[in-house]
Image: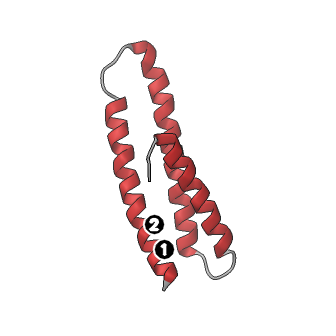
């Protein structure tokens, strides 16, 4: 039961994280001086990579059997922490 609640919460966080990432992407693609466009694009790519890592680890946990679940959860939590830190998401 706790795993179901955990995964339900995680799915909700994934959706919220995707919304936040989409909002950041929209603001970072706005017209601005060309010299900062490359830096903003690089930063956005880092955000997207962090989100992809969270999504990948979430999928691994969702499809896992009973072996190694604790390690998968720790990895997912670390990925979440890195993503939140990168985008400045205060949880």
- The disc placed on residue 85 is none
x then y, percent, for residue 91: 44, 54
The correct choice, above or below, for 26 with respect to 80 in the image is above
SS at badge 2: helix
Residue at screen point 37% across, 13% down: 33
Location of residue 29 with respect to 71 vertically, above or below = above
Specify the quadrant of the image occupied by residue 70: bottom right
Q: Which residue is mark 2?
A: 10
Other-residue count near label 2 (Cα within 10 Å), few / some / many at <14 / 14–19 / ≥20: some
Q: Residue furthest bottom?
A: 1
Against 34, residue 80 (above or below) is: below
> Who's the residue at 49% across and 32% down the image?
43
Element at badge 1? Answer: helix
Q: Residue at x 51, y 29 (%)?
A: 42
Q: Residues within 10 Å of mark 1 (few under 14, many from 20)?
A: few
Asked if labels 1 and 2 touch by Cβ distance under 8 angstroms, the answer is: yes
Q: Quadrant of residue 22?
A: top left
- Identify whether 49 is placed above or below 28: below
x, y (%) of residue 69? Answer: 64, 75
Q: How is the image coloured?
A: secondary structure
Residue for point 52% across, 48% down: 83
Q: CA distance from mark 2 to mark 1?
A: 6 Å
Q: Is residue 53 visible?
A: no
Q: Is residue 46 visible?
A: yes
Please provide percent x and percent y for residue 2. 50, 82
Locate residue 85, reporting x and y percent. 52, 44
Which residue is tagged 1?
A: 6
Left or right: where does residue 43 sit relative to residue 69? Answer: left
């Amino acid at each position: 039961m706790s795993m179901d609640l955990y995964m339900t919460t995680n799915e909700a966080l994934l959706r919220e994280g995707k919304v936040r990432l989409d909002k950041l992407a929209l603001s970072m693609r706005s017209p601005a001086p060309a010299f900062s466009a490359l830096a903003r694009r690089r930063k956005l790519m880092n955000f997207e990579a962090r989100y992809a890592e969270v999504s990948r680890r979430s999928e691994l946990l969702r499809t896992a059997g009973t072996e190694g679940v604790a390690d998968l959860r720790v990895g997912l939590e670390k990925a979440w922490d890195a993503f939140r830190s990168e985008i400045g998401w205060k949880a």
